[in-house]
Amino acid sequence: MTEKKVYDCGIAEDNYWFRYRTGAILVRDNKMLFVKSMYGGYYYMIGGGVHMGETSKSGVEREVLEETGASCTAKNLAITCENFFIGSDGAIDGKQCHTIEYYYIMDVPKDTEFRDSNDEGEKLVWVSIDELASNDIRPAFLKDKLKTAIEGGQLIHVINDERNP
């Protein structure tokens, strides 16, 4: 039987890169789970590209399982972001980047176990919610918005443009 090929929703043309992605807000004991980037030492959200034909909710649940080994359910959409930036590492270095991002609050059952590193070998790190502002978290707007999103309330919409700081 031939394995079905899957494609992330995204486009790369010339010096432009676009991606439709999800991010997981995983909270336990007043700490949030992040990936520590192998490129610059900053933290970013667990998540990734939504596959063609996949919902963002299914995508974030799949990404959490792939990256952490834990099965968690997306409870609610908390933050949407139109994100513009210049790529600074890896395959997107120097590219004009544009992402549409959906960040979900995840249900994290108490006895859920998480791996120490993701599927690419990057460390998974629990960061205190009270210390988000003092860490290098990307995109940077998350430092200000995550606490509000975790506490609940209305959906947060952000247009983040870091192309011309």
Image: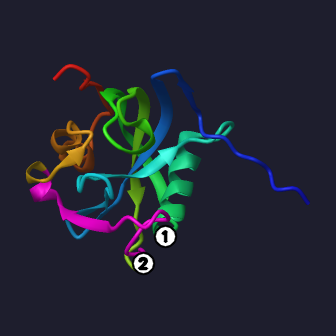
Q: Residues within 10 Å of mark 2 (few under 14, many from 20)?
A: few
Front-lying residue, 93 or 147: 93
Q: Are marks 2 and 1 in contact (CB under 8 Å)?
A: yes
Residue 65 in the image: x percent, y percent?
A: 53, 64
Q: Residues within 10 Å of mark 1 (few under 14, many from 20)?
A: some
Residue 19 in the image: x percent, y percent?
A: 49, 32
Q: Which residues are magenta?
A: 114-132
Residue type at mark 2: give it.
Glu
In what quadrant of the picture does the N terminus appear? bottom right
Find disc 2 in the rendering and name its residue.
113
Q: Residue at x 20, y 63 (%)?
A: 127
Q: Distance from label 2 to label 1 (Cα)?
A: 6 Å
Residue type at mark 1: give it.
Ala
- Give the left or right position of residue 104, taking residue 6 as reference: left
- Give the colour scheme of this rendering: rainbow
Front-lying residue, 89 or 137: 89
Q: Label 1's element? A: loop
- Give the left or right position of residue 157, taking residue 74 as reference: left
- Give the left or right position of residue 17, taking residue 135 as reference: right
* Residue 20: in magenta span: no
In what quadrant of the picture does the C terminus appear? top left
Q: Counting residues from the N terminus, which is met first, the one under dot 2 or under dot 1?
A: 1
Front-lying residue, 14 or 41: 14
The answer to whether 64 is drawn above or below residue 160 in the figure is below
Q: Which mark is residue 70?
A: 1
- Picture quarter containing residue 146? top left
- Give the left or right position of residue 9, taking residue 103 as reference: right
Residue 29 in the image: x percent, y percent?
A: 23, 70
- Picture quarter containing residue 37? bottom left
The answer to whether 57 is drawn above or below residue 67 in the figure is above
* Residue 115: in magenta span: yes
Q: Residue at x 24, y 26 (%)?
A: 162
